[in-house]
Image (cartoon, rainbow, N blue to C red):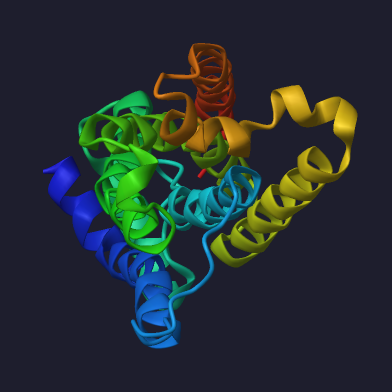
Amino acid sequence: MLWYKGWLETRFQAVFALLFAVFPILLFTLATPHAANPAPQMSVAQAESAAGFFALYYSIVPLILAGSGVKAQSTWMRKAVQGSVYFTLSLPVSRFRLFATRAGLGMLEAVAILTIAPCFLRIAFIEPQDHVSHSDLFAFWVTLSVCASAFHFLAVLLSTFLDDQARGWLSMLGLVCLYGLLSKVPLLAPVNIFRAMVSPLFTHSFPWSSIGVSLGAAAVLGLAAFRVVQTREY
């Protein structure tokens, strides 16, 4: 019942996130030059930079779908918020289960939508001669989903004390600032998580260190968010 209730409350955000993920494909399709005048071949560095930017773009999807368990109502439905919160709290389930269901559902929806990302990169940037296999695209999808989980749970934490609109803008602003900082500061290049997200396309292997750090950050942020939800008075 909780999963179904969570789906009813997040389905519009899921549709918006899906449209957000599909938008670059439509834009690229309309902007692609005629086959008789193909775009010039990109260098490896240019391809990595472009793929890193779209890793940033698709990292926004988990932010759209972030929720915080009890306090996760859409601002588009303000009149129903109060009653929905009290109904949820009246259910014979723990706050941990409420929190885990909403946060987990949002992450599952994000992972499903992120399957579009490798398809788009394959269409837009990866030529057949680049020797990128289907297993590399699968590794990219897994890496993108796992690394983006840290951003998802950061937004979950923010949503425990901010409304949906403020949480969305603040988390997206933080994501863009992080991308700019990691891209512009040479000393931070080795820890550029956005480059690590797309590294399976070029190194043909998983960036295990970045995956481990992302999972650790997601766990810490998730526990912090649950602690806030647990101690709040509704």
Q: Position of residue 232 (x, y in %)?
A: 57, 35
| Nearer to us in this view, 166 or 125 | 125
- Using the rendered view, name the quadrant where residue 116 is placed: bottom left
Residue 151: quadrant of the picture = top right
Quadrant assignment, res 181: top right
Residue 226 placement (x, y as % from top left) = 50, 27
Q: Is residue 194 left or right of residue 178?
A: left
Q: Is residue 187 left or right of residue 51?
A: right
Residue under the image location 74 percent in, 23 percent down: 190
Task: State whether residue 233 appears in this view.
Answer: no
Q: Position of residue 62 (x, y in %)?
A: 44, 48
Q: Residue at x 30, y 38 (%)?
A: 137
Is 192 on the left-hand or right-hand side of 75?
Answer: right
On screen, residue 29 above or below 156: below
Is residue 179 visible in this depiction of the protein? yes
Q: Is residue 77 left or right of residue 14?
A: right
Task: In the displayed orientation, state which residue is furthest to the front.
Answer: 36
Residue at horizontal 20%, vertical 61%? 8
* Residue 77 coordinates in the image, percent (x, y): 39, 75
Tell me if residue 143 comes above or below residue 10 in the rendering. Answer: above
Quadrant of the frame with the N terminus = top left
Residue at the spot 62% in from the left edge and 56% down from the top edge:
167
Q: How many badges with numbers are in the image?
A: 0
Is 231 in front, or is 192? Answer: 192
